[in-house]
Image: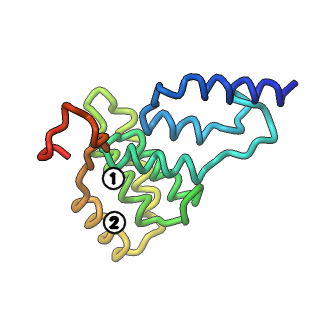
Amino acid sequence: MRLLKILLVIVACAVAGPVIAEPFEDALAAHNIGSTYYYGRGVPQDYAQAAAWYRKAADQGEPSAQDALGIMYQRGHGVPQDDVQAHKWFNLAASRYRNNDKEKRDQAAKSRDEVAGGMTPAQISEAHQLASEWKPKEPNKPASDPLTTPTQR
């Protein structure tokens, strides 16, 4: 019965192919595979796929994805455990949440500070340097998009 449900979900996804989710939504879906909310027990979470999608959204400036990517680097889920990268992404998230997302901004700053507690001054300096050099990337636009001019690609 469970296999039938999974197959139905796969078929439904194939039929809905033209609908493309945002990178952050894809990251959440990959991260949540295996939770009881989705398919029940026994299906492993796809941390590597979630990290790849979080990275895509984080690179575009999405603070929730930056925060989630910080957690993944902090825990080593889907990426090598790396406190410098975790600190960088938490720092970026804390600086990019909107004013009405004060709780999220404060949590990202708290996570950044917790990671910093186990880092050397040189590592913290490196993380700050990486965060200050970071620039958001434009989402990839298809080359056949008639609204995209060569200077916008």
Q: Amino acid at mark 2?
A: Ala
Task: State the residue position of label 1.
Answer: 91
Quarter of the figure with residue 3: top right
Quarter of the figure with residue 141: top left
Give the colouring mode of the picture: rainbow
Going 42% across and 45% down the picture, which residue do you hit?
67
Q: Is residue 111 left or right of residue 92?
A: right
Going 34% across and 50% down the picture, which residue do you hit?
59
Between residues 75 and 115, which one lies in front from this camera angle?
Answer: 75
Dot 1 crowding, Cα within 10 Å, few <14, some 14–19, many 20+:
many
- Check residue 129 in the rendering and tell me which mark sits there, or answer none: none
Residue 112 location in percent, x, y?
Answer: 40, 54
Going 66% across and 38% down the picture, which residue do you hit?
33
- Check residue 127 in the rendering and tell me which mark sits there, or answer none: 2
Q: Is residue 136 left or right of residue 72?
A: left
Q: Secondary structure at mark 1?
A: helix
Q: Amino acid at mark 1?
A: Asn
Of the residues under marks 2 and 1, which one precedes in the sequence? 1
Residue furthest left in the image: 151
Between residues 151 and 80, which one lies in front from this camera angle?
Answer: 151
Picture quarter with the N terminus: top right
